[in-house]
Image (spheres, rainbow, N blue to C red):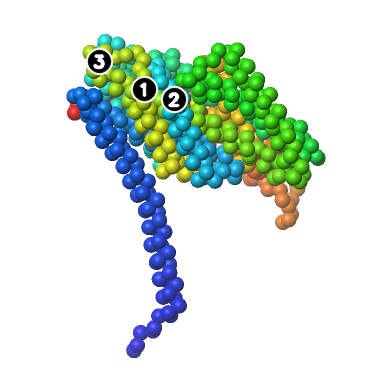
Amino acid sequence: MNAPRRNPAARYVNDLRRYGFSQSQFYSLRGTVVPLGLAIVFLATVSLLVAGSHSTFGEDWLIVAIGAVIGGYMALNIGANDVANNMGPAVGGKVLTVTAAILIAAVCEAAGAMLAGGDVVRTISKGIIAPGDEVGVGAFRDLMLSALFAAALWINLATVLNVPVSTTHSIVGGVLGAGVAAAGPGLVNWITMANIAASWVISPVVGAVIAAAFLYFIKVRVLNVENRLEAANKWVPLLIATMAAAFAAYMAMKGLKKVWTPSGVEIILFSGGSFLVAYVLSRPFIAKRVDRLENRKKDIYSLFDVPLIGGVALLSFAHGANDVANAVGPLAALVSTVGEQGEIAGKVTIPLWVMAVGAFGIALGLGLFGPRLITVVGEKITRLNSPRAYCVALSAAITVLIATTLGLPVSSTHIALGAIFGVGFLREVLENPNRRKLRPGHKLNATSNDAFNSRGFRSVRRLVRRRYVFSIAAAWVITVPASAVLAATIYGLLQIL
């Protein structure tokens, strides 16, 4: 008996499915292998450049080369993880594409690191430890390598898990763990650690409150009024001027501290002048735009696009200027011990080539591995639009200013994400004004839009994905302990080897 012949059409469909699957696997593999390959090429180039300058470092060239590779690895991870917090809101608000955001951030991060990156840093990062005679040069080098490598590993793991974490807290934890492993808990400045722990709560809460306050103002004064065009013409220039003033002070206090160290009066004058200039320039610009718009919310959203792009670009510049030290500060500390006669300097100058490793590494890490986390921050936590993203960026600048004025150590990551949570939870409150209880004997008909849970309360429409709230909060809490344990482990292994 002859076997039944297969349907040619079905065979053709199966072939197409197999081809489509193979093609998807190829693109997935290419999307993983190519970035990894380029990252390895970058790190290999760094090691070869240091090796080529071995005469400068003498017998210590190998330890410097290892430190440079680990510093480059840390910079790649900072670009992959931390930069997403600045650009994610603009992408989520549909103001920038992922590609455009990466290009702007890469240029601004590298420019900030090279042009305004801090040239003097504490050798042991943020004053966490204070080594004395109990820590020799050899142990200090191992300490720095352990801290840097542990922080990079932790950030890498967080990036793979799509969780944005603080790179500052990661390196702090690394220095803490390696310092305790090297000389015990007495080496640690526990007052500084307590301040950092307090910032875990303070910075996201303040960021959330400020972002929610600005969004509420925009909703009440601009978006939810009858004549939105007239309201926008009145209030949007003031909002733009407020952002200009905030970022002027932010750049003066944080972003340009290498090239300019202004007094308090100079900062106020610079910020106030920026407010006036921005207001005078933005009034005719907004008036001209408003004349071409309709009285719809979506049209009003577009008025925030330009100031938002400028804001996130300045955030990236300031981030590059400040956080490049997280990548290369320990490396610079290690380099400073080369040629020293058994002495560990209290402060060191970051050499230009070390700064270049950090700057280029951050930009490359953003381009190769940043898109995933940019999408998570901008689109997965809560739904953003241009005004909401604008409030996030403005909140980040203002919160850093407040913290800097009060001398509080805060994380830009925590602030930005706290601001995103703030605008999301504000929307939940405004769109769920009452959780009305179902009256006894009341029955819902099939066409009712009301939804009640098992306890008889109307279900709340959740506009912030809780799983991201819990996973990000958990990652924040364990960042310092996790990187500390990793660093202590690595330091112990180095002593055995």
Per the rendering, the mark at residue 350 is: 1
Name the residue nearer the viewer: 468 or 401.
Answer: 401
| Residue depicted at 63% across the width and 28% down the height | 243
- Characterize the local packing of mark 2: few (<14), some (14-19) or many (20 or more) Cα atoms within 10 angstroms: many
| Residue depicted at 67% across the width and 36% down the height | 429
Q: Secondary structure at mark 3?
A: loop
Per the rendering, the mark at residue 117 is: 2
Cβ–Cβ under 8 Å for marks 1 and 2? yes
- Characterize the local packing of mark 1: few (<14), some (14-19) or many (20 or more) Cα atoms within 10 angstroms: many
Q: Residue furthest bottom?
A: 1
Amino acid type, label 2 = Gly
| Residue depicted at 35% across the width and 27% down the height | 354
Report the Cα–Cα distance between label 2 and label 3.
Answer: 25 Å
Question: Measured along the vertical axis of the image, is residue 48 above or below residue 130?
Answer: below
Cβ–Cβ under 8 Å for marks 1 and 3? no
Question: Measured along the vertical axis of the image, is residue 39 above or below residue 250?
Answer: below
Q: Secondary structure at mark 1?
A: loop
Residue 475 shows up from this direction: no
The residue singled out by tag 3 in the image is: 340
Cβ–Cβ under 8 Å for marks 2 and 3? no
- Characterize the local packing of mark 3: few (<14), some (14-19) or many (20 or more) Cα atoms within 10 angstroms: few
Q: Point out the tag, 2 or 3, that comes first from the N-terminus.
A: 2
Q: Where's the N terminus, which quadrant? A: bottom left
Examine the image and state in which quarter residue 394 appears: top right
Name the residue nearer the viewer: 140 or 97.
Answer: 97
Q: Position of residue 111 (x, y in %)?
A: 46, 31
Q: Position of residue 400 (x, y in %)?
A: 55, 23
Q: Position of residue 206 (x, y in %)?
A: 58, 25
